Amino acid sequence: MAEAKKKDRGLWFREMKSELKKVVWPNKQTVVKNTGTVLLCSAIIGAFIWVFDFVSVSLVQMILSVFGA
């Protein structure tokens, strides 16, 4: 039973190695460009969330002050 698991595991690693050889890895320029795009999109989404949070908190505080809570 243990021998079968070892063979399966060895086969899995050999197949994984052969598949990784087929991968076309991006060059440095592409990686830098994609990283910049991800960082920019993350910053924009973060800014939208921050603005939405600020407006929401302000509205809730205004509503609570109007009703005297």
Image (spheres, grey):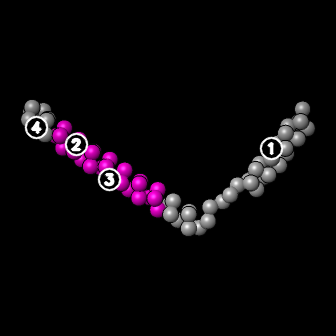
Q: Which mark is residue 47?
A: 3
Q: Nearer the viewer, residue 26 or 35?
A: 26
- Name the N-terminal-most of marks 3 and 2: 3
Residue 35 lies, in percent from the top left, at 50, 60
Front label number (4 vs 1): 1
- Name the N-terminal-most of marks 3 and 4: 3
Name the image quarter holding the N terminus.
top right
Measured in 3D between alpha carbons, the distance from the residue under mark 3 to the one under mark 2, in whole angstroms, is 15 Å
Compared with residue 44, is residue 8 higher up or lower down, i.e. above or below? Answer: above
Label 1 packing within 10 angstroms: few (<14), some (14-19), many (20+)? few
Task: Please tell me whether the stretch drawn in magenta is mainly helix, strand or loop.
Answer: helix
Is 58 within the magenta?
yes
Q: Nearer the viewer, residue 41 or 69?
A: 41
Question: Mark 4 = which residue?
Answer: 65
Measured in 3D between alpha carbons, the distance from the residue under mark 1 to the one under mark 2, in whole angstroms, is 53 Å
Front label number (1 vs 2): 1
Q: Nearer the viewer, residue 33 or 58?
A: 33
Residue 47 lies, in percent from the top left, at 32, 53
Residue 19 lies, in percent from the top left, at 76, 50
Question: Mark 1 = which residue?
Answer: 12
Q: Residue at x 37, y 50 (%)?
A: 45
Measured in 3D between alpha carbons, the distance from the residue under mark 3 to the one under mark 4, in whole angstroms, is 27 Å
Q: Residue at x 52, y 65 (%)?
A: 32
Measured in 3D between alpha carbons, the distance from the residue under mark 3 to the one under mark 1, in whole angstroms, is 44 Å
